[in-house]
Image (tube, rainbow, N blue to C red):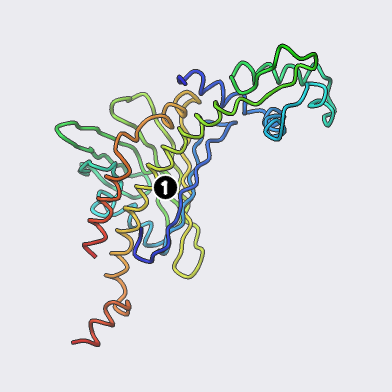
Amino acid sequence: MDDDQLSRVFAALADPMRRDIVARLAAGDATVGELAKPYDVSVQAVSKHIKVLAEAGLVSRSRDAQRRPCRLEADVFDLVTKWIERYRRQAQERYERLDAVLAEMQDGERPSHPRLRQQGAVS
Amino acid sequence: MNTTGSRHEVSIEADPTVPVIRITRDFDATPAQLVRAHTDPALFARWVGPNGMETEILDWDATTGGRWRYVARSDGEEYGFHGSFHEVRDDRIVQTFTYDGEPDGVALETLWFEDLGGGRTRLHAQSLVDSFEGRDQWLASGMETGVEEGYAKLDALVAEL
């Protein structure tokens, strides 16, 4: 996935109704009519949202069936998740180093630390 | 992987409506200790990373209206970063962040230190960048260093304790 497509994915998901549509498609394929039912908007409006999601590669529509149900393209989501996961792991590594530094600071600041108490009992 | 045996996970959120990355992470430390680890240059250089890189602080005034500059070095490669401390207080640090290789880009970083009591603190870190493109490239970049390498460096730090 190139940067442009990633930007399109994020832009497509910037709209709350489109996020809702994606969430519902995650449960199973649905036609535009079915997707439009819970909303107080026209089928045409929902159709436009589907078009944005399709252009971002998030949703596809089968050509064969008369119903032409919308389907979530889970692969695209996996890619986005992986990219964010890499970034998350990097932050996790950084903060585990911070954990170690903080633990050392606490050893220095707390004379009553259990380890120091143990040493005192031995000596 | 820390000394208490518990492992605190990072949670990350890329906001779809504004070019922001939000990170939340708990620590077994007080807000005051976390602020010190972020403002004392010798402590900061030890954990800011990335893995496999040495961080050298070149300029550091962690006070409201102050500034910072450091380089990360590895195998002759050098990456410089600089910014301003907009506000430094007991529970919050607001600063700018620029990578010298992209001098036109600047992120606004806000760190909140939420006291959870019992010597625990929740860090909320928010980075606001110039554009969605910038944010998404940022998310996609980095991570050349492996996870195993990171654990090795952490093990070494823990062994010093």
Q: Which residue is drawn at 39% across and 64% down?
A: B5
Q: Residue at x 32, y 76 (%)?
A: A113
**Which of A55/A71 is in front?**
A71
The residue sitting at the top extreme is: A63
In the picture shown, does residue A4 fall above or below A119? above
How many numbered marks are there?
A: 1
Q: How crowded is mark 1: few (under 14 residues within 10 Å), some or many (20 or more)?
A: some
The residue sitting at the left extreme is: B76
Q: Specify whether A88 is left or right of A120.
A: right
Residue matched to label 1: B87
Q: Residue at x 42, y 64 (%)?
A: B30
Q: Specify whether A63 is left or right of B65.
A: right
Q: Specify whether A16 is left or right of A58.
A: right
In percent of width and height, residue A63 lies at 71, 12
Q: Specify whether A59 is left or right of B35.
A: right
**Local SS, label 1:** strand
In the picture shown, does residue B104 fall above or below B87? above
In the picture shown, does residue B79 fall above or below A100? above
Residue B107, image quadrant: top left
In percent of width and height, residue A65 lies at 76, 15
Q: What residue type is labelled 1?
A: Glu
In percent of width and height, residue B150 lies at 29, 46
The residue sitting at the front extreme is: A64
In percent of width and height, residue A83 lies at 45, 32
Q: Residue at x 42, y 55 (%)?
A: B89
The C terminus of chain A appears in which quarter of the rendering?
bottom left
Instruction: Check the residue under mark 1 and report the chain it is in.
Output: B
